Amino acid sequence: MYISARADYALRAMLAVADAATTGDPASGGGELVKAASLAENQDIPLSFLQGILLDLRRAGLLHSHRGTEGGYALTRPPDEISVGDVLRAVGGAITSVRGIPADRAGYHGVATGLRDVWLAVDGAIALVVDRTTLADLLSDRATAP
C-alpha cells in the first residue's frame, strides 16, 4: 500500500479538526471551528493543496464548513465514528489498487491468475486495520504515549 502525500495530509488535517472538536467548550456547542489557513500552518501543508483535500473530505461527508470570519471546518460525526479508512477512501478512492485500478477489478490470465486472490487478501488485511482505527483512537494513543 502506498500512502500518498494527499492521504497523509488528509489524515493530519482530520486529526487536527478532531482534536479541536474534543478540546472545545461543550457549553458553547462543542469544539472550535478550524480555519484552513490555521490547519495549513500548524500541519505544514501547502494551503492550496489543503483546500482541495478539504473539499474532498467535505464532499465525502466527513467535514462541514461554515462561512464567514468566524467560520472554519468541523467534523460531521464524532471522532470515534470516523475511521482512517473513511479518510483514505475520501481522498484516494480504493485502499489498494493494482496498476491504478481497485484490486477487486484486477484481472489476470494463465499462470498469473492467482495474483488477484493475493491482492484481494492484501486489500482485506489493510482494510481491517484502517477501518478499525478511528480518529479518536489516534488521538488517545497520543495522549497515552510516554
Image (cartoon, helix red, strand yellow):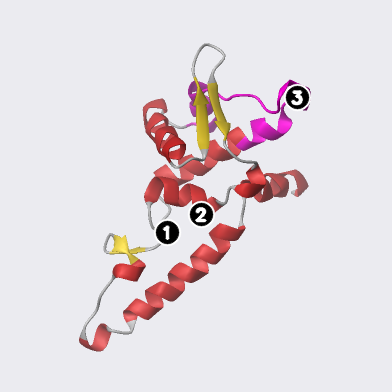
Look at 38% across and 53% down and name the residue there.
93
Q: Magenta stretch?
A: 18-44
Distance between mark 3 and mark 2 Cα atoms: 28 Å
Going from N to C along the chain, the mark reached first, 1 or 3, is 3
At label 3, counting other C-alpha atoms closer than 10 Å, the crowd grade (few under 14, some 14-19, many 20 or more) is few
Amino acid type assigned to the residue bearing label 2 in the image: Gly
Q: CB of mark 1 within 8 Å of CB of mark 3?
A: no
Going from N to C along the chain, the mark reached first, 2 or 1, is 2
Look at 61% across and 59% down and name the residue there.
132
The answer to whether residue 106 is left or right of residue 6 is: left
Disc tally is 3
Distance between mark 1 and mark 3 Cα atoms: 35 Å
**Residue 66 spot, x, y in % from top left:** 52, 22
Quadrant housing residue 116: bottom left
- Quarter that holds the N terminus: bottom left
Look at 59% across and 34% down and name the residue there.
16
Residue at the far top: name it: 69
Foreground of the two, 88 or 81: 81
Quadrant housing residue 57: top left
Residue at the far bottom: name it: 111
Amino acid type assigned to the residue bearing label 1 in the image: Ile
Q: Check disc 2 and report the residue beneath it.
A: 85
Q: Check disc 1 and report the residue beneath it.
A: 95
**Residue 124 spot, x, y in % from top left:** 48, 70
Look at 76% across and 27% down and name the residue there.
26
Q: CB of mark 3 within 8 Å of CB of mark 2?
A: no
At label 1, counting other C-alpha atoms closer than 10 Å, the crowd grade (few under 14, some 14-19, many 20 or more) is many
- Label annotation for residue 118: none
Amino acid type assigned to the residue bearing label 3 in the image: Asp
The answer to whether residue 99 is left or right of residue 133 is: left
Q: Check disc 3 and report the residue beneath it.
A: 25
Going from N to C along the chain, the mark reached first, 3 or 2, is 3
